[in-house]
Amino acid sequence: MSDQRTLSTMATSPVRRRAFLGGAAALGVAGLGGAGLFAGTGTAQPASAAAAIPDADQDALDLLQRMLRFDTQNHGQGAKTRKHAEMLREVWERAGVPVEVIDTPQPDNVHLIARIPGTGTAKPLLILGHSDVVPVERENWDVDPFAAEVRDGEIYGRGALDMKGANSATISALLRHLAEGATFDRDIIVLTDCDEEAGSFGSSWLAKNHWDKLDAGAVLTEGGWFLAQDDKTTPMLITATRQDKVYFNLDLTADGTATHSSKPMPDSAVVALSRGVAELGEWQAPVHLTTVTREYFAALADASDDRRFRQAIRLMLKAHSQNALERAAAVMVKRSSYSYLHSALLRTTHAFVIEDAGYKENVIPSSAHVRVNCRAIPGGQKPRDFLAQVRQMMKKRGITVELAVSEGMEEAETLDQLDKTWATPAADVDTDLFEALTASASTTYPDAAFAPALFEAGTSLAPWREKGIPGYGVYPYVIDNEQLVAMHGNNERIYVEALQQGSDFMYGVFKRFLK
């Protein structure tokens, strides 16, 4: 099939790498003045003249700093994104681009849709980027997480990496094209959505209520990592994800005798649960390699400067038994500069995220509970098999393991849904969008390898994937492992120059859709 032929070519003929610090040549110029872009309503009309777009709006760093200064924390029930959306609406209006704010039932929790009219030669391209961010632990940050401070060549802030940085690189690149009077061969829809991190009114709600505004031929969102060599700045591997891991949660509960805390008893629920958590914390699910992950690791081996790391990967890929695979994978992870990422791409992961027990200091509680967030590899171990494995391990400790289900659903129904998601094929690489990502990677990062990949996390792509619309992901800036670990953590940051080069990368992607 064409999918396999394309992947095979990528894996055996990688493009090599060079350092981004010191500069890659920009793919376009910014700040060109001109007449205003046509901003039609109803039937979209293509732009035909350059727009007088301010230089600051075309500057990825300036735009990102403005985004970061809006506190759009999502504590689990959505975020307040209106002010952030209004700022971006003004950016789009200055460029003459039709833009609309979509209110949700939750006050000040809004979506923003900008639509750059094209010639209509092909179905629209949709760019999906969320505006909400996870909460911060302010006391653990070295800087104000909403001040957008630049320190030692890095821009700090909640959302700098995930994913206001990606939004900034994308929007600034499009505005550079519009400033030059570009016309695209299709409409380009830029959706800045809310409730990606949690909440009831995210992309699925929007698709259900406003699909006519979102229908597209392909979608690009967050995902693929641009990894650096051990020196933390030289681009090593540029990836575009074409598949996400399968998200599900388990609830572990231990029971014991509730009594006065002055008389401890041997069946403490807290102790029993702690022992179970300790056992699971030291355990890892089996390694599973799929077509997607094999192609990724093959490209990674070709890209790395670390000889022993390359050898470990190739040994893993040649393993002929599960025992040999496990041993080789362990060596590969140990040698990797991105060990947590690469371990996550090998197996179903389980992370302990919420623990609760007790309600008063002089009462021994009758139960203790922990929520475990899990991510399964499509085509690897099924969620139902992982659940059975964990249940068997915890049974001897008297700990119950339940699959978290939505209200009104049963476990069997939820497992059937997870099986369906697990079996969803990866997005085809034989599309014009994936070809544009490949070509721009070659131009912007000529000495780095490029590969399709699996995203170890999740995205908002479900409404489009359910309709068979191909979706891909990139975080378009080179990062090191410390920056990757800071995602959803403390001192989230990216390199300023990597951000600027990421805008060049996105400029190159959109260049492939010019009329």
Image: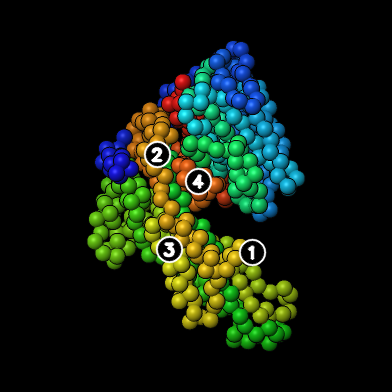
> Residues under labels 4 and 3: Cα distance?
23 Å
Kind of residue at disc 2 = Ile
Q: Nearer the viewer, residue 4 or 23?
A: 4
Q: Choose top left, top right, bottom left or bottom right for residue 358.
A: bottom right
For residue 467, which numbered disc appears in the image? Answer: 4
Q: Which residue is mark 2?
A: 238
Kind of residue at disc 1 = Glu
- The local secondary structure at tag 2 comes to strand
User: Horizontal and vertical percent for residue 308?
Assistant: 28, 50
Q: Is residue 61 above or below residue 209?
A: above
Q: Nearer the viewer, mark 4 or mark 1?
A: 4
For residue 382, which numbered disc appears in the image? Answer: 3
Q: Choose top left, top right, bottom left or bottom right for residue 83.
A: top right
Q: Is residue 216 left or right of residue 17?
A: right
Q: Nearer the viewer, mark 4 or mark 3?
A: 4
> Residues under labels 3 and 2: Cα distance?
28 Å
Q: Is residue 404 left or right of residue 507?
A: right
Q: Residues within 10 Å of mark 4 (few under 14, many from 20)?
A: few
- The local secondary structure at tag 1 comes to loop
> Residues under labels 2 and 4: Cα distance?
28 Å
> Residues under labels 4 and 1: Cα distance?
25 Å
Query: How are the colours assigned in the image?
Result: rainbow
Q: Residues within 10 Å of mark 1 (few under 14, many from 20)?
A: few
Q: Residues within 10 Å of mark 3 (few under 14, many from 20)?
A: some
Mark 3 vs 2, N-terminal side:
2
Look at 44% across and 72% down and name the residue there. Answer: 389
Q: Which residue is mark 1?
A: 407
